[in-house]
Image (spheres, rainbow, N blue to C red):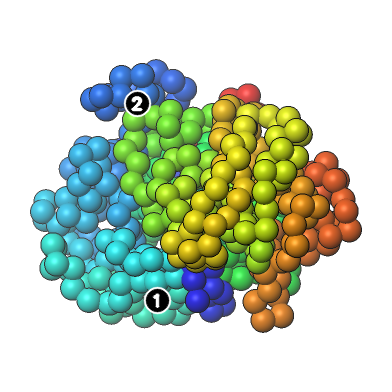
């Protein structure tokens, strides 16, 4: 089964490096363009941003000195010279009891739906535990086996509910809560900004690609999500909150995308190669739920190239004629090398974002689905008894509305109230300004 296979079901405080602060968005020291920091050489026009890892390293690892720590990370946990957090800590004498690798593995060698297994890391000699798909109980067993007292999380998320690292964060936090461990998040920017979009996950549709009641594009950083989890979900699930602290970014705010900052980009998974992929993913990721259309896996532009063997230029023309904001559509032909329609010529669309500030990835993808339903022998993907699109979107609503001939406005308007409620619910947990929202 691929990356989207179902997984088994299984704070408030914000720590800087010299003290603890709690308060409204922006209290963490995040600022607007021109905030303190140094631009990365070669990118003088980009906004300088310090990640949580940057700040912790600059302090000489103060927040973890004297602790036996466990590190939850993958290849994205790097500094400005692409040196990994684990390698730097290990070289500097920080005591690491174990490393915990999510989907694709700690060093990132596994494809979608895979992991690297438990073993010894060749570079550091540390034990790496296979945490992909681990239940909260299994996380607790691994933490106990590693003898750790503090958990450090440093993974680049991409901002979509169906991207699995946010559940790696949640389950490891729940295990830490049960064991009374400290939890430290080294924050990184949300690469697609701080705005929330899309429908809410609802009861009866939870799965490994949508475990918690958040909207499809949550618009939060990992640190903000950790605070949200601690306040909204952990007391009921784990029976208590966790001692969670966030070392926040400096210089980031909610209107900045990955391409706007000087933070190095490392692909967080094999089919998330560029920041451009992340921008479209909360929307075009829904095409994984369509049996008759490829979402571009097996091409060099996954989630930007969408199409199928039964389409032609007319689908692109219909979608382009909608004049959707912030995006253009190129007539495209491609032959996937793996996944859906491997080795078969597909016709369709390349999604070209022209203005990220007004682009709505989910509305755009809904419009593409509505028009594709009119143009081809359209069929939703079914796994067992469940429609995959329902698991991705959080309910049967989108599927049934499109099947009934609803317009794009009807579909996207149907979740306006729940989106507004979510934005209000998340507000106390935000750490960074959301200018213009």
Residue 202 is at least partly visible in this image:
no
Q: Give the distance between the C-alpha atoms of the residues marked 1 and 2, in whole angstroms.
A: 37 Å
Among the 4 quarters of the image, the one containing residue 102: bottom left
In this rendering, would 397 be left or right of 222?
right
Point out which mark residue 140 bears.
1
Point out which mark residue 270 bears.
none
In percent of width and height, residue 249 lies at 39, 37
In percent of width and height, residue 91 lies at 10, 53
Mark 2 neighbour density, 10 Å: few (under 14) some (14–19) many (20 or more): many
Secondary-structure class at tag 1:
helix
Among the 4 quarters of the image, the one containing residue 73: bottom left
In percent of width and height, residue 32 lies at 47, 22
In percent of width and height, residue 21 lies at 44, 39
Among the 4 quarters of the image, the one containing residue 288: bottom right
- Specify the quadrant that holds the C terminus: top right
- Closer-to-camera residue (158/418): 158
Asked if the residues shown at circle 1 and circle 2 are in contact, with their CB atoms under 8 angstroms apart, the answer is no
Q: Residue at image x 13%, y 62%?
A: 123
Q: Residue at image x 39%, y 71%?
A: 114
Q: How many marks?
A: 2
Using the image, determine if residue 110 lies above or below residue 322: below
Residue 264 is at least partly visible in this image:
yes
Mark 1 neighbour density, 10 Å: few (under 14) some (14–19) many (20 or more): many
Q: Earlier in the sequence, mark 1 or mark 2?
A: 2
Q: Residue at image x 34%, y 30%?
A: 262
Q: Which of marks 1 and 2 is in front?
A: 2
Q: Residue at image x 37%, y 23%?
A: 46
Point out which mark residue 48 bears.
2
Using the image, determine if residue 257 lies above or below residue 204: above
């Amino acid at each position: 089964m691929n990356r989207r296979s179902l997984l088994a079901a299984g704070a408030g405080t914000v720590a800087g490096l010299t003290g603890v602060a709690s308060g409204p968005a922006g209290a963490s020291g995040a600022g607007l363009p021109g905030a303190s920091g140094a631009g990365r050489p070669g990118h003088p026009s980009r906004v300088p941003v310090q990640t949580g890892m940057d700040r912790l390293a600059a302090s000489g690892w103060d927040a973890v000195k004297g602790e036996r720590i466990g590190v939850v990370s993958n290849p994205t946990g790097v500094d400005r010279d692409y040196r990994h957090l684990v390698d730097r800590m290990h070289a500097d004498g920080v005591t690491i009891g174990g490393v915990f690798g999510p989907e694709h593995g700690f060093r990132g060698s596994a494809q979608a739906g895979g992991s690297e297994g438990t073993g010894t890391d060749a570079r550091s000699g540390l034990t790496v535990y296979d945490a992909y798909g681990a239940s909260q109980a299994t996380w607790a067993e691994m933490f106990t086996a590693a003898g750790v007292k503090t958990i450090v999380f440093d993974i680049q998320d991409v901002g979509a509910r169906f991207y699995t690292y946010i559940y790696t964060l949640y389950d490891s936090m729940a295990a830490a809560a049960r064991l009374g461990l400290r939890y430290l998040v080294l924050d990184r920017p949300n690469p697609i900004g701080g705005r929330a979009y899309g429908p809410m996950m609802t009861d009866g549709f939870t799965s490994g690609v949508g475990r918690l009641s958040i909207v499809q594009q949550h618009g939060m950083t990992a640190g903000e999500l950790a605070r949200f989890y601690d306040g909204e979900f952990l007391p009921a699930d784990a029976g208590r909150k966790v001692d969670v602290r966030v070392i926040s970014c400096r210089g980031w705010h909610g209107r900045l995308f990955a391409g706007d900052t000087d933070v190095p980009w490392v692909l967080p998974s094999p089919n998330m190669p560029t920041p451009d992929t992340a921008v479209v993913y909360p929307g075009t990721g829904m095409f994984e739920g369509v049996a008759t259309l490829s979402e571009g896996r097996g091409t060099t532009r996954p989630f930007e190239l969408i199409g199928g063997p039964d389409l032609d230029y007319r689908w692109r023309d219909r979608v382009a004629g909608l004049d959707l904001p912030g995006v253009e559509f190129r007539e495209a032909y491609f032959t996937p090398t793996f996944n859906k329609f491997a080795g078969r010529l597909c016709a369709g669309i390349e999604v070209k974002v022209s203005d990220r500030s007004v682009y709505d990835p989910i509305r755009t993808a809904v419009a593409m689905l509505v028009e594709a339903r009119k143009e081809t022998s359209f069929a939703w993907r079914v796994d067992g008894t469940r429609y995959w699109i329902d698991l991705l979107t959080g309910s049967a609503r989108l599927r049934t509305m499109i099947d009934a001939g609803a317009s794009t406005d009807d579909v996207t308007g149907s979740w306006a109230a729940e989106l507004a409620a979510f934005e209000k619910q998340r507000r106390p947990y935000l750490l960074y300004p959301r200018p213009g929202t």
